[in-house]
Image (tube, rainbow, N blue to C red):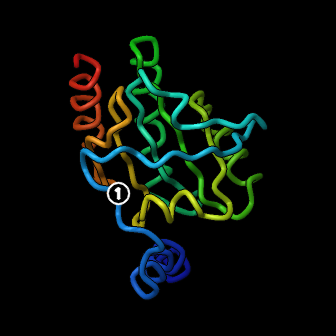
Amino acid sequence: MKIASIKRCCLPLLLACAFGSAAAAVQLSSTAPDFTLKSVGGANLRLTEQRGQVVMVNFWATWCGPCRQEMPHLSRLYDKYKSSGFTLLGVNIDDDPRAAAALAAKLGLKFPVLLDTDKKVSKTYDMSAMPATLLIDRDGRVRHIHRGYRDGVELSYEEQVRGLLKE
């Protein structure tokens, strides 16, 4: 891995550790903090409007190699369960929304890609690792938190989504 790639991947984590987070980390079983973000399509999307659905919120960036590796798995998961009461919100933290839109188009993502260019939502959720993924139940409670990506984690995602859909 090139030094520049390491810096891009690790810098946000180092900054978060050095300066602390603006809010306490989101806790399991707590109500997911509400947010409204603009999508790459231009429409605003609010988290609380998703109540009644099982919601996966995935924080990602175009410069994050593991994020890019994970996206096709997330896309398949969304396609498989969207008609069963599941939605996936991809929260991009890039400074330039055009980069997020371009990668989403290149990957053929069909789930909503939201833009957190000022990083307020990712700070609220204390997402100090990329990618970071939360699963929220139909009542708006955080049920699972995943930080980082490793091969095979998509199997855990699917098992957790199925379990929440059955509740």
| Foreground of the two, 151 or 123 | 123
In the figure, is residue 153 to the left or right of 110? Answer: left
Determine the residue located farthest toward the bottom in the rendered image: 18
Residue that badge 1 annotates: 26
The residue lying at 60 percent from left, 64 percent from top is 119
State the image coordinates of residue 87 (x, y, percent, origin top left): 47, 27
Identify the residue at image location x=40%, y=45%: 32
Location of residue 109 with respect to 147 vertically, above or below: above
Disc 1 secondary structure class: loop
x and y percent of residue 65 in the render? 48, 59
Give coordinates of residue 147: x percent, y percent. 32, 58
Disc 1 marks which amino acid? Val
Badge 1 density bin: few <14, some 14–19, many ≥20, Cα 10 Å = some
As rendered, which of 53 and 68 lies closer to the eye?
53
Quadrant in which the C terminus is drawn: top left
Q: How many marks?
A: 1
Left or right, residue 99 beside residue 81: right
Residue positioned most to the top = 83
Location of the N terminus (image quadrant): bottom left
| Vertical comparison of 20 with 73: above or below | below
Above or below residue 121? Residue 80 is above
The answer to which quarter of the image holds residue 97 is bottom right
Residue 22 place in picture, x, y as percent: 48, 73
Left or right of 48, for residue 54: left
Residue in view at x 51 percent, y 54 percent: 60
Q: Is residue 9 left or right of residue 42?
A: left
| Residue at image point 42% right, 45% down | 70
